[in-house]
Image: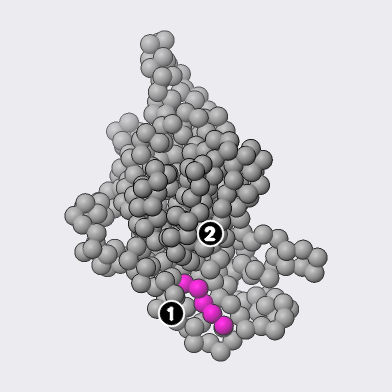
Amino acid sequence: MLYLRFHALEKRGLLYSLIMMNLSYIINHLGEERAQYFNAVSPPVVQSSNFAFADLASMRRALQDEKESPFYTRGCNPTVRILRQKLAALEQAEDALVFSSGSAAMAAAVLSQLSGGDHVVCVAKPYSWTNKLLNQLLARFGVSTTMIDATDPAHYEAAIQPNTRLLLLESPNSITFELQDIAAVVEIARRHNLRTIIDNSYATPLFQSPIAMGIDLVIHSASKYLGGHSDIVAGVVCGSKTIISRLFSHEYMTLGGIISPHDAWLMIRGLRTLPLRLSRSHETTMQVVAYLEQHPKIARVNFPFSPSFPQYELAKKQMSGCGGLFSAELRAAELGQIDQFCERLHYFLLACSWGGHESLAFPMSALYTAQTIIPPPRAAGI
């Protein structure tokens, strides 16, 4: 893992080097004021919905700062606060909020930047629930969205309208993993005074640093690599203190899509091994992809760190690794052949999601029947 990271550090400056040299501190120590918790090596799960006060003055102080002072767990919980600090530091952000799912995180972030009548420019083929948020739910309230082929940054600029407020990225993209040139899109957004949001679930903070490239808000489905053990559903929003504080006071507290203290503790546990898990995942996936690309029954493999990937040079420029998520297209004459292939897998479980300890395959053929085509979820595996 250190080789993967420091190979990229040569091009990214002293600040980035210092942050990564402190990676162990962030995941193992940051936010864990052990003297307050009996010097416990593992932080406690503060499983309480509310908190009591010795006097009215201290109660008033906590109520005036619900984001940082434990008053009611919907606002601030000590276990969740430890996790927030670690996630913000990993993303090189000033602050972070943790949600009950990645979809909740994305919805709150997008809502925080829009009003009725606004317009969004979004990468085509986003995660299915992001697509539904924009084109179904928000459309009911007068928010319009233009979906673009975002492999060319100029398409973002061409789609901007007088009422555009937000550019939405997902790099790499779902299913086929096209990239957006993040720095180029940020430059466009700044010229037009627009906000930017990116889904960084695929790359994680260890393999891609959107905040350092100028993105305003970074979203994660923390159910994936950040949790890493397929036992929690969670989401993260990272950004500046100004944006996060406003989001906290409105969408976060009002909609209430919070993570539980126990799930926050499980994610803290997952972060301890994040560098090791990502390193092994990247290394083994490179071997699997190389094998599949030479196999006569595979038509195509989509993986940004493969030299055959159309945007390979951009991937190397703005990412330092890829993890273990790829898609493969089989040479199959009919749907049944794909079904047969998937049902004969020995070491891959047939399941959705990704980023856990197990190997998964999500066949897109599972979404197709004779009568209906269901919008695909976030891609996973074969």
Q: Is residue 182 above or below residue 329?
A: above
- The main secondary structure of the magenta stretch is strand
Tell me residue 47's x, y (percent).
Answer: 50, 33
Classify mark 2: helix, strand or loop. strand
Residue 255's quadrant in the figure? Answer: top right
Is-magenta flag for residue 300? Answer: yes
Comparing labels 1 and 2, the label whose residue is closer to the camera: 2
Q: Is residue 121 above or below residue 253?
A: below
Is-magenta flag for residue 44? Answer: no
Q: Residue at x 53, y 68 (%)?
A: 176
Residue 12: give its label. Answer: none
Apparent side of residue 5 relative to residue 123 in the rendered image (left or right): left
Q: Examine the rendering and report whether any part of residue 56 can be seen.
A: yes
Badge 1 amino acid = Ser
Apparent side of residue 159 relative to residue 241 in the rendered image (left or right): right
Residue 332's quadrant in the figure? Answer: bottom right
Q: Is residue 279 above or below residue 157?
A: below
Q: How is the image coloured?
A: one colour
Screen quadrant of the C terminus:
bottom right
Q: Examine the rendering and report whether any part of residue 48 can be seen.
A: no
Residue on which the image places disc 2: 148
Residue at the outermost right position: 371
Badge 2 amino acid = Ile
Mark 1 and mark 2 lie on one chain; the one further toward the N terminus is: 2
Tell me residue 9's x, y (percent).
Answer: 24, 62
Q: Residue at x 77, y 68 (%)?
A: 369
Is 314 in front, or is 203?
A: 314
Residue at the outermost left position: 14
